[in-house]
Amino acid sequence: MRSADERPRAQGGDGPSARPLTSAGTGGFVERYGLWDERQHVAAGHVRRVIDELGLERVRFSFVDQHGVLRGKTLTREAVPGALRSGVTAPSSLLLKDTSGRTVFPVFSGGDPLVSVRFAGAGDIVLVPDMTTFRVLPWSEGTGWILCDVHHPDGTPTAFCPRGLLRDRLTALADTGYDLTVGVELEFHVYRPAAGVSAPVSVGRPGAPGPAPEVEPLSSGSQLLHEEALDRLDDLVCLLHRGLTGLDLPLRSLELEFGPSQLELTLDARDAAQAADDALLARAAVRQICRRNGYHATFMSRPAAAETASTGWHLHQSLRCRATGEAVFDPAPGETLSPVGRHYLAGLLEHAPAATVFTTPTVNGYKRYLPMSLAPDRVVWGIDNKGAMVRVVGAQGGGGTRLENRSGEPAANPYLYIASQVVSGMDGMARQLDPGPPTRDPYDVTARGLPGSLSEALDALDADPVFAEALGKDVVSWLTTIKRAEFARYLAHVSDWEQREYFDLV
């Protein structure tokens, strides 16, 4: 336990943080609106003990925004009890911004029904800590980390909280008798700063981010799973291994991928909500660990330095029976999938163009959809076929059959990506859709194609009523408004390609 010398630090004591962390107490926002169950209260007691015993001085209270990016505040140890009682406030406009930090909706002038009441004036939202997510950061001494859910000041959950949206869809799935298990494969790039180039702060403004850092690759590429090439990156691999496992993430592997500086991490399959948290924290951990050690990590799908291979997020998914825990995709002898599995698969295919807004939410991600690239560009499924959008995989030795959606990009919001799969699969099961035969040619030009751009995907989402019915019309309108504004900025930008192509020609 910590010293009880409570004299001010100026007098040689340990200061107020020497006192044991007090209980969350009563009468705050969390209790008033009944936002914690018994499990949360028990976890809160455990967290207080850990903070005392380890002498933590800071705790990050973070929430995931619409882009899958962590945002929040770092509170001092003395402020933590109040945050446990009443949450942490933040500007509601954080839920209304595009990827450049520009607020897309008119929060001050009004006139938009989506924001006219709940978000007018960029008033506060309240971050309510989920105490079961508490971690101690291995790379930041004396710092804890808690994920939060987002509520309005009247205690109601905001409809635009990605964690809440996934939780609602998983509850709907549970009402049909099933739970979802998800396995995560995340590819990413890690670079070093370019030789002789300093790393100044990249100053930009909302709507116009500053220049990207200049970097160099760590590996030459073109040698998939080459052991010696990975050994050359052993210092980096060890840093990532210690950091990720230090967060209690279920890390399975760190692998060298095909492209220059391209790596992959895989996580054990878990309950879908937990897997989404895992993916979110793993991405943040990789970026922070790399930055602290002189590297630059990015989950952008096709950065300019990716000469031969883009990165993807392969999402493995399977259903189990809530009553028995039995895997329900496993087929009868001679079959590929169970009837439930076939219907779920058919739903993924049926709604793939619209779901692409959730699986591939950036302008850049669509540049990954190339033929003969181990990335899909057609809405097809195959049996252990890595060119197909959905790959049916049977566990070694039989059993544990799962579906691997290979269309996602690693920058996708984990909660919205997984929620889109639940929405699609449930519709396939409800309507007993059939996926048709597996493909033998995943790049067959006669097959239905995935959207060629974010704009095409947004049109597909607007045309598919299933997502508005499941997630809510306001949620779909919120997301498409933000993403259309983002795409409009992209179209308005004069690119290097245009300058090279036309400036000296016409």
Image: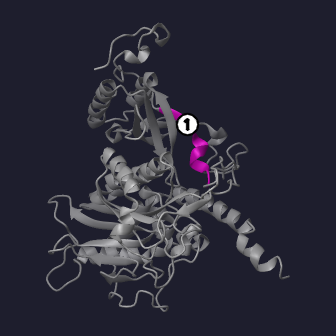
Dot 1 amino acid type = Ala
225, 381: nearer the viewer = 225
Specify the quadrant that holds the C terminus: bottom right
Q: Is residue 22 visible?
A: yes
180, 389: nearer the viewer = 389
Q: Badge 1 is on which residue?
A: 90
Residue 193 drawn above or below residue 54: below
Residue 214 drawn above or below residue 380: above
**Residue 60, image quadrant:** top left
Residue 34 drawn above or below residue 236: above
**Magenta-colored stretch includes residue 94:** yes
429, 281: nearer the viewer = 281
- Residue in view at x 44 percent, y 74 percent: 351
- Residue in view at x 83 percent, y 82 percent: 505
Residue 385 drawn above or below residue 74: below
Residue 317, position as x, y percentages in the image: 31, 66
Query: Which residues make up the magenta segment?
Result: 88-98
502, 483: nearer the viewer = 502
Residue 341, position as x, y percentages in the image: 27, 74
- Residue in view at x 62 percent, y 47 percent: 115
Specify the quadrant that holds the N terminus: top left
